């Protein structure tokens, strides 16, 4: 038995199918922007060191309340939205420029006149360093002890979290995070935009084996 297909309906179906697939966010196409707001502002991290990005949206929580032989679920609150971000633990390169200078030499001529009219010249070289001119530029890179992880936990090399038993309030140490999912057309769909504090940081693992980048994950929870 041959089944006939409505061609126009099938074409519409294909068109809708392609459109929906085009709008699907790809798991490996995203944008994340993190800015420390307090205790200091820092320039955003380069997008190239972000390796993953996930959002666990706030969900309601409930507790069962027995009523006779049955029970009802009473909404008691909601979990906080969390954001987990994977990053390369990139060491920060401190670049500086060093100049080599040449000394400027001046020649002074001393003239001495005698009674018979002869002139005797004596010259001397004076090396002046008051106005040196650069003749060579050397660019060097030195790796400091700063890392991606330090970006979140330190300020000028000093840990932000107190070590003397005191505590910080939420608004004394927090970040603003924006995250977008991208589709095939690179259109952005906002996944998160809010203020967050650090909830958890995973360890950076170093081990023997195949070459791999040093990575870690950091989890934030939304300030509500």
Image (cartoon, rainbow, N blue to C red):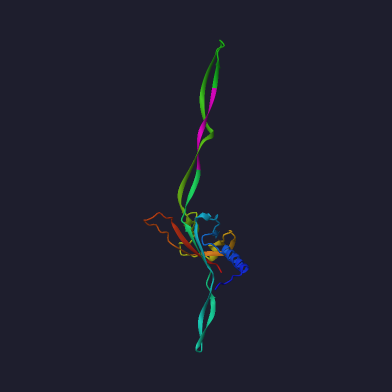
Q: Position of residue 66 (x, y in %)?
A: 50, 86
* Closer-to-camera residue (168/110): 168
Residue extending furthest front?
Answer: 1
Q: Give the answer, above or below, for where 122 lies relative to 13.
A: above
Residue extending furthest left?
Answer: 208
* Closer-to-camera residue (214/152): 214
The stretch drawn in magenta includes residue 214 = no
Q: Give the answer, above or below, for where 28 lies relative to 4.
A: above
Main secondary structure along the magenta-highlighted residues = strand
Quadrant assignment, res 13: bottom right
Quadrant assignment, res 108: top right
Q: Quadrant of the C terminus?
A: bottom right
Quadrant assignment, res 14: bottom right
Q: Quadrant of the N terminus?
A: bottom right
Q: Position of residue 140 (x, y in %)?
A: 47, 43
Residue lying at 59% horizontally and 61% vertically, measured from the top left: 188
Residue lying at 52% horizontally and 21% vertically, measured from the top left: 123
Residue lying at 46% horizontally and 47% vertically, measured from the top left: 142
Where does the magenta region start and end?
A: 97-108
Q: Give the answer, above or below, for where 183 lies relative to 67.
A: above
Residue lying at 51% horizontally and 42% vertically, measured from the top left: 97
* Closer-to-camera residue (166/170): 170
């Amino acid at each position: 038995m041959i089944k006939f297909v409505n061609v126009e309906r099938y074409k519409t179906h294909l068109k809708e199918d392609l459109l929906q697939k085009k709008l699907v966010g790809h798991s490996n196409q995203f944008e994340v922007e993190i800015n420390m707001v307090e205790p200091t502002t820092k320039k955003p991290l380069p997008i190239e060191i972000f390796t993953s990005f996930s959002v666990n949206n706030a969900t309601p929580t409930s507790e069962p309340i027995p009523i006779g032989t049955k029970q009802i679920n009473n909404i008691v609150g909601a979990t906080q939205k969390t954001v987990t971000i994977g990053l390369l633990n990139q060491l920060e390169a401190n670049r500086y420029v060093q100049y080599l200078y040449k000394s400027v030499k001046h020649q002074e001529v001393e003239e001495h006149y005698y009674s018979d009219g002869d002139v005797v010249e004596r010259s001397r070289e004076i090396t002046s360093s008051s106005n040196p001119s650069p003749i060579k530029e050397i660019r060097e890179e030195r790796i400091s002890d700063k890392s991606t992880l330090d970006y979140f936990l330190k300020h000028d090399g000093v840990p932000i979290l107190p070590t003397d038993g005191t505590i910080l309030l939420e608004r004394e140490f927090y970040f603003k995070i924006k995250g977008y999912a991208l589709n095939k057309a690179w259109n952005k769909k906002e996944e998160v935009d809010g203020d967050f504090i650090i909830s958890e940081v995973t360890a950076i693992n170093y081990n023997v084996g195949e070459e791999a980048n040093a990575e870690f994950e950091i989890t934030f929870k939304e300030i509500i």
